[in-house]
Amino acid sequence: MITSDTKKPLIKQARIIHYQIHQMINELEYRSRQNENSKSVYRKNLLEDSLHYMRKNANVLLAKLTSAQQIDSYCYKMESAWLVRKAIRELKNDIKSLELSGFAIENQRKVLNLEIEQFKNLFAPWVKNIQPKTGEQDEWGFI
């Protein structure tokens, strides 16, 4: 069983990623407003869509991880773990897509990738320690 002391670094790292994503979003929105007239409609739409999904995935990351640590259900924890992993993967894809589309975010991406690696180092052991309680049932047959 994971104690609350070992859970805290994972939540702390998720909060760091959440904060950095929102900082990146704020900076990109600020730059977009500064260069309002010089952007094509395509680039504007790409930026708006990417920022929307980045915001959503950053929030999913933190919300699902926090709730999974408070709810004592194997299925809920595993589902949340999968959603957290998916959110991280989508964040990385959106950031890389913006960078490849000409948005200058290489430094933020590099820093964020380091934070994500630290998160994965904490996340993997947490997932491995999720165990169903004796007698726990799932109506879908997963356990």
Image (cartoon, rainbow, N blue to C red):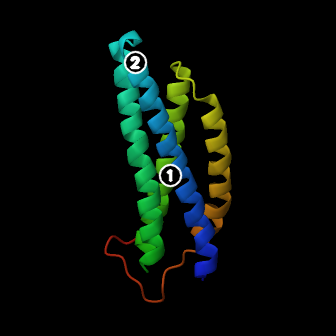
Q: Position of residue 110 (x, y in %)?
A: 66, 37
Residue located farthest toward the front when viewing the structure as drawn? 34
Give the quarter of the image for residue 53. Answer: top left
Indicate which disc residue 43 carries.
2
Placement of 121 over or under 101, stated as above or below: below
Give the quarter of the image for residue 112. Answer: top right
- Which amino acid type corresponds to the residue marked 1 in the rendered image? His
- Residue 121 in view: yes
Q: Position of residue 5 (x, y in %)?
A: 63, 78
* Residue plotted at (41% across, 54% down): 60
Q: Position of residue 122 (x, y in %)?
A: 65, 63
- Which amino acid type corresponds to the residue marked 2 in the rendered image? Arg
How many circles with numbers are drawn on the protein?
A: 2
- Residue 143 in view: no
Image quadrant for the C terminus? bottom left
Placement of 110 over or under 83, stated as above or below: above
Give the quarter of the image for residue 111. Answer: top right
Residue closest to the eye, 27 or 15: 27
Placement of 55 over or under 98, stated as above or below: below
Placement of 103 over or under 54, stated as above or below: above
Of label 2 and label 1, which has the lower sequence position? 1
The residue carrying pointer 1 sits among few (fewer than 14), some (14 to 19) or many (20 or more) residues within 10 Å by Cα, namely many
Horizontal side of residue 137 vs 13, given as left or right: left
